[in-house]
Image (cartoon, rainbow, N blue to C red):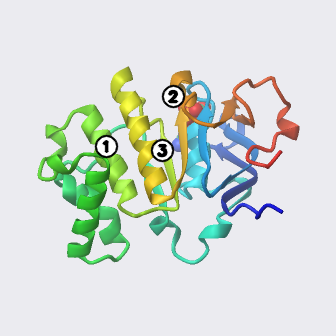
Amino acid sequence: MTARPEVLVRCQDAARTYGEGPAAVVAVHGATCRVCVGDRIAITGPSGSGKSTLLHLMADLERPTTGDVAWPALAGEPLPAQLGVVFQGPSLIPALDVTENAALPLILAGVTEERARRRALDALALVAADGLAGRLPEELSGGQSQRVAIARALALRPRLLLADEPTGQLDRATGRHIIDVLLATTDEIGAALVVTTHDPTVAGRFGERWAMHDGRLYPGPEPDRQSAATALPGEPS
Ligand code: ADP
């Protein structure tokens, strides 16, 4: 008998609409999916298909307009301490150096400054960015900034890491390296990993791929493989 997988996040018919009336945009139509311990998932789809919005729902950065999002295995501690998020585009605070940036979520979570600094340095070492510790964001390349943003998310030692287009601003080689870093480091700390990407090469690195098209979530890379009504991404087959 196989053990039941631990569910980190579950979306049940979760929808998100922006605006009201004729101007309303349905960014995500009722999405049903789940992410379990050990999962490695890429959410693919063209720009505007709803990938970021779905990721934000899973990160509790947005609340669903209808439906439900729950974090069954993360009930013990506040969610921000257990969910690592790597945002799309530049997200480091310009006035803080690399270590201070990586330590900030820990300090906000109540960790003492000294301990936060130590954990930030450990996380920077995981992504081979400890040599950048005293630099300011303006002194970093795009790939270096992204590694620091990943370290900032890893410093929390999250159970689930959600990365929104982590290679979007990078050249191909740097992007490949960032995916290597994400896969290796989440493996090392035992975190599940979900990335959004419009790049099929990036998606190809992930064992499980979900596709989004016009706000609808499909279980495979081809939107026409299965109807949205029957799609249950993350459900065991
Ligand atoms: P993707 O990540 O695939 O590019 P998004 O989730 O960013 O897609 O966007 C899905 C749709 O929702 C798009 O039409 C986008 O313009 C719209 N949208 C996203 N965020 C907002 C917002 N804060 N206000 C209004 N519309 C939004």
**Which residue is at 72% across, 60% downward?**
5
Which label belongs to residue 163? 3
Q: Is residue 88 above or below residue 69?
A: above
Foreground residue among 189 and 95 = 189
- Answer with the quadrant where ligand 1 appears in the image: top right
Q: Splitting the image into 4 quarters, where does residue 223 fall?
A: top right
Per the image, the residue denoted by label 1 is 147
Q: Is mark 1 within 8 Å of ligand 1?
A: no
Q: Please tell me whether residue 126 is drawn above or below residue 197 in the rendered image.
A: below
- Identify the mark nearer the N-term, 3 or 1: 1
**Dot 3 lies on which element?**
strand
Residue at figure coordinates x 39%, y 55% from the top left: 153
Q: Position of residue 90 (x, y in %)?
A: 32, 40
Question: Sequence order check: which comes first, mark 2 or mark 3?
Answer: 3
Judge left or right: residue 124 versus residue 189: left
Three-letter amino acid code at the position of disc 2: Val
* Residue 119: % across, % down: 28, 66
Q: In the image, which disc is placed on residue 73? A: none
Tell which tag, 3 or 1, sits nearer the viewer.
1
Residue 230 picture quarter:
top right
Residue at 23% of width from left, 59% of height from top?
121
Give the residue at mark 2: 202
Q: Nearer the viewer, residue 66 or 81?
A: 81
Amino acid beneath label 1: Arg
